[in-house]
Amino acid sequence: MSQPPSMSHPTKNPAPKTSSLPKRFYKVVSIKQENKLYQILLDGRPAKTKSGLVLGAHSIALAKAIQKEWDAQETHIDFLTMPMMRMQSTILEINEEMRQAWEGEVNRFLRSDLLCYRAASPETLVEMEANAWDPFLRRVKGYYGLSFNVTNTVLNVEQPSRTLDQGARIISNYNDAEMLCVRRITELTGSAILGLCVGAGFQDKEAIIDAGRVDEDYQSSQWGVDAESLQRMEAVAQEIELAMQFYKLVNET
């Protein structure tokens, strides 16, 4: 059976030693609107991205979330605890090469999507996959007009050229923030279809998480789950939640 492109699953990284972190150098975190950008200010001075760009957001909701992250830092600054800031910094610093790489990655998953490769047996797993995945296939068909071929054999299934062409156009039309979220959901779950659903505004994070780990949940029900696997699944779920939270904040006014 053809498999989706390889992907890396996050694991919970150990907290860095305080001595390796920069010290908090500011007292007050505020927001200032300038040129339609809500800038993050540290003691009245603009916060900067790694490359020196002014840190800010076009959504006040996202700006407030980033402000809260900066304000939550105590004696030292741990950027691992600032996911909204890190994602927004990535968006501010994105270049054409990075953007094209993201689009290419999602398009590759679209050609051999997890949701299109089903088990032939046992019946319990067949039903679990159908219950978790079929609603998303219906969703992308209803929202985007995309139809996918599904197989339960070991043979590769070709997707309609119209679906792949239309999918590529949809992906290219996402703004950079949407593209970041779609790409992140895609690589975390192995499914561009799930990513496209998030790109269409789907916000049921539990359904996305469950759809991305149907096979793992089945194996766990049969054989149990070890601590390492549980940690990995929890880390993936957390990353999915963060990506969907970022999408929501970006689109709030």
Image (spheres, rainbow, N blue to C red):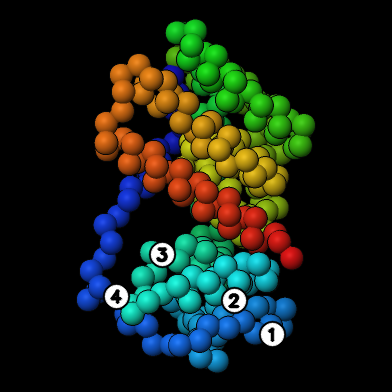
Q: Which residue is mark 1?
A: 34
On the image, the x and y values in percent for residue 89 come to 51, 70
Measured in 3D between alpha carbons, the distance from the residue under mark 3 to the one under mark 4, in whole angstroms, is: 12 Å
Amino acid on which the number 2 mark rests in the picture: Gly
Spatial CA span between label 3 and label 2: 18 Å
Residue 116 position in % (x across, y down): 56, 24
Q: Which quarter shows the N terminus?
A: top left
Examine the rendered structure and indicate whether residue 213 appears above or below residue 124.
below
**Which amino acid type corresponds to the residue marked 4 in the rendered image?**
Leu
- The residue tagged 2 is 56
Marks 4 and 2, the one that precedes in the sequence: 4
Q: At 23% across and 69% down in the image, what residue appears?
A: 17
Q: Residues within 10 Å of mark 3 (few under 14, many from 20)?
A: some
- Please name whichever residue, 66 or 58, is drawn nearer the observer in this view of the structure: 66
Under mark 3, the amino acid is Thr
Q: Label 4: few (<14), some or many (≥20) within 10 Å?
A: few
> Which residue is found at the position 65% from the left and 44% from the top?
203
Q: Residue at x 65, y 35 (%)?
A: 164
